Image (cartoon, rainbow, N blue to C red):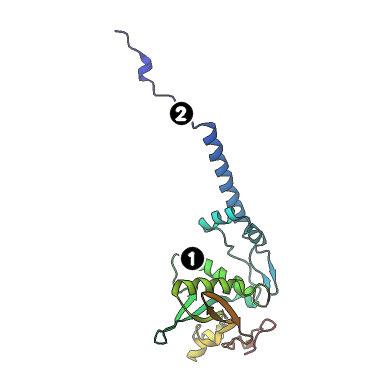
Amino acid sequence: MKHDSTLDEPPAAQWPSQGVRTVVSLLLFVHLFALAIAMTSRATTVETEFGPAGSELLSRMRDVPFLMRYLQFLELDESYNNAWTQGGPLDSDHAIEVVLEFKDPRADQLTIRIPADRLWPPLREERYRSLALTAAALVGNSQRENILPQAIAEKLVGEHGATGGTIRIRRHFPQSPQEAASLDDAVADPNSDRYYETVYEARILVNDGDVSLLKSESPGTAAPAATGGATVPLPPGEATP
């Protein structure tokens, strides 16, 4: 009996059709393009009154719906704003504090801090720090300073069913070596109120489900912050300690 050698040969590889390969190539191009946008948008090019904050390129790309949704899915839609410090107010840490109130007067107020302490994974905390920094950089711009606080208030009110509250942007000034070594606990404690300043404050108003903000012209908790015996300069228009 004659042996047929063709039976021992593996079947020939079947490549996807031309249409499938075209779609895969297109998706790969979109993916690489999105990664390129995310990488190049790391530069802080948007100039504010107190220095650069955010990415102009990334801001413009927000007008492209599909691309921004894809970047958000990959968590690449925010710049981290890594830059050399210049000793200005925006070089300090910032946080957003939201105090929610409820219809039941017996219910306790709910305080939410962004970023929350010991947030995991650390990348989430860095993203929230970037959010707080961007919000602080826009304070003083009458056309844009309410955009982020408004969006945050709407989301938290909707999530928790609050009937009002207060939203603040707080700046945390660093200590000097002399202050850190002080024998006075209030001075040595880096989380003491003396090192915090409220740069933005607004009442959260809820009317038939619609959320609006009423900004306070004089933030209620502008604490003195001194570094090395010198008062840290405040941006124009803010309440002095």
Secondary structure at numbered mark 1: helix
Specify few, some or many for label 2: CA neighbours under 10 Å numbering under 14, 14-19, or 20 or more: few
Q: What is the quadrant of residue 42 in the picture?
A: bottom right
Which labelled disc corresponds to residue 180?
Answer: none
User: Label 1 amino acid?
Assistant: Arg
Query: At 49% from the left edge and 64% from the top edge, which residue is drawn?
Result: 123
- Asked if residue 77 shows in the view, the reply is yes
Above-or-below relation of 44 to 201 = above
Q: What is the quadrant of residue 37 in the picture?
A: bottom right
User: Label 2 amino acid?
Assistant: Gln
In this view of the protein, which residue sits in the foreground, 210 or 85?
A: 210
State the image coordinates of residue 166 (x, y, percent, origin top left).
53, 82
Secondary structure at numbered mark 2: loop
Residue with the most extreme top position: 1
Residue with the most extreme left position: 1
Residue with the most extreme front position: 208
Quadrant placement of the C terminus: bottom right
In this view of the protein, which residue sits in the foreground, 88 or 117?
A: 117
Query: At 62% from the left edge and 66% from the top edge, which residue is drawn?
Result: 83
In this view of the protein, which residue sits in the foreground, 163 or 12?
A: 163
Residue pointed to by mark 2: 14
Marks 1,2: beta carbons within 8 A: no
Residue pointed to by mark 1: 124
Left or right: 3 with respect to 216? left
State the image coordinates of residue 218 (x, y, percent, origin top left).
62, 87
Above-or-below relation of 179 to 55 = below
* Cα gap from disc 1 to disc 2, whole angstroms: 44 Å
State the image coordinates of residue 213 (x, y, percent, origin top left).
58, 79
Which comes sooner in the sequence, label 1 or label 2? 2
